[in-house]
Amino acid sequence: MFSKAHYPDILMPEDLDLYLADGWFRWGQSIFTTSFLNFNSLFYRAIWLRVVLSDFNDDKTFKKLSKLNASFRVEIQQASITPEKEALFQSYKKGITFKVSESLEALLFGTDKKRIYDTREVCIYDNDKLIACGFFDMGKDSAAGINSFYDHEYKKHSLGRYIIYSKMMYCKNLGLQYFYPGYFAPGYPAFDYKLDIGRSALEYLETANEQWMHINTFDSVAGSISEMREKLSNLVDHLNAVDIEARVLTYRYFDANLVADFNGYNLFDYPIFIYCLEFVPEIINPVIVYDFRDQHYHLIRNMSVGMADKIEDQSTEYSAHLMKPKQVIFSSDNPEIMATMIASAFRSNMKAES
């Protein structure tokens, strides 16, 4: 599965460490992981990051920011939501282009009354004026940055970066091993700033082998949406050559596993796939995916766990059914073999029906 969410009633510090090491992140009072994101109707990979604090030293950027912001007061303490912080957060939202939570209350707690995280905050003051704030969760040997926001009138002070560095130094001084700043999304520049913070000690989670590797080894093509689309398009050409109707579609419900009402359903969660044969709303034909983790094509039979009220034959998006994988029918790393097998199976079915 590419996307999962858990809703624990209790989260011990050492449990948070394990979640973070596997590429999970807080969502209100739950925790989730995902490999794919959708911004402005475009898909991106989510690449999870962490800083090895023992390898992180005061780099040039942090020294420069510390000097630039030397006149400000920095306070780090247990987190709390106050009207002052909420007002700053609402003001901050007006000056950004990407979507964030409607409020700090929603961001940190959602609709839950439980409190499973040990959350701290960094507050930066210009005299008595709160000009920046950021939250982070503490595990036993690691911590995770949640968010940072600031007064846009102080934009030249790079307070967002300064807060993240402040979180990292706080955790390093406590003897923690790792700091997790969340993810970045190759091709979506809003999160690229994370790649310049503690760069010498920055690692990413390579999901193909579930290993943390230095960011300098990151390959922006391997496992990308563009690679998946290229592999699938190549197979479409082979299928068309053997008279099998096929097209690459995006899947509207790729992240449905993150919806609390579908917890435990283990739904189909590929963002793009090949839809074979004629589109008939009442029928779910097998679909073909390309999985970058094993570098294989898979022909998958799905079952429906929900049907859209209004179904249209979309040329680029599939939204007729909320799907759950039932069976992997066939797999291959070779598109020609995959197309030949599918053509043979289709013709066998046609003869059986005639």
Image (spheres, rainbow, N blue to C red):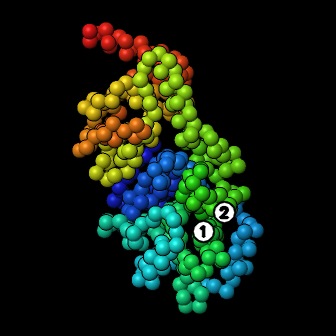
User: Is 320 left or right of 200, judged from the image as shown?
Assistant: left
**Residue 3 location (% of width, % of height):** 43, 46
Q: Name the residue nearer the viewer: 214 or 288.
A: 288
Instruction: Determine which residue is flagged by label 1.
Output: 164
The answer to whether 332 is drawn above or below residue 248 in the figure is above
Quadrant of the snapshot with the N terminus: top left
**Residue 84 location (% of width, % of height):** 45, 84
**Contact, mark 2 vs mark 1 (Cβ under 8 Å):** yes
* Residue lying furthest bottom: 127
Mark 2 or mark 1: whose residue is earlier in sequence:
1
Quadrant of the snapshot with the C terminus: top left
Q: Which residue occupies 50% across, 33% down?
A: 291
- The answer to which image quadrant residue 283 occupies is top left
Q: Residues within 10 Å of mark 1 (few under 14, many from 20)?
A: many
Instruction: Determine which residue is flagged by label 2.
Output: 197
* Residue lying furthest right: 60
The answer to whether 245 is drawn above or below residue 79 in the figure is above
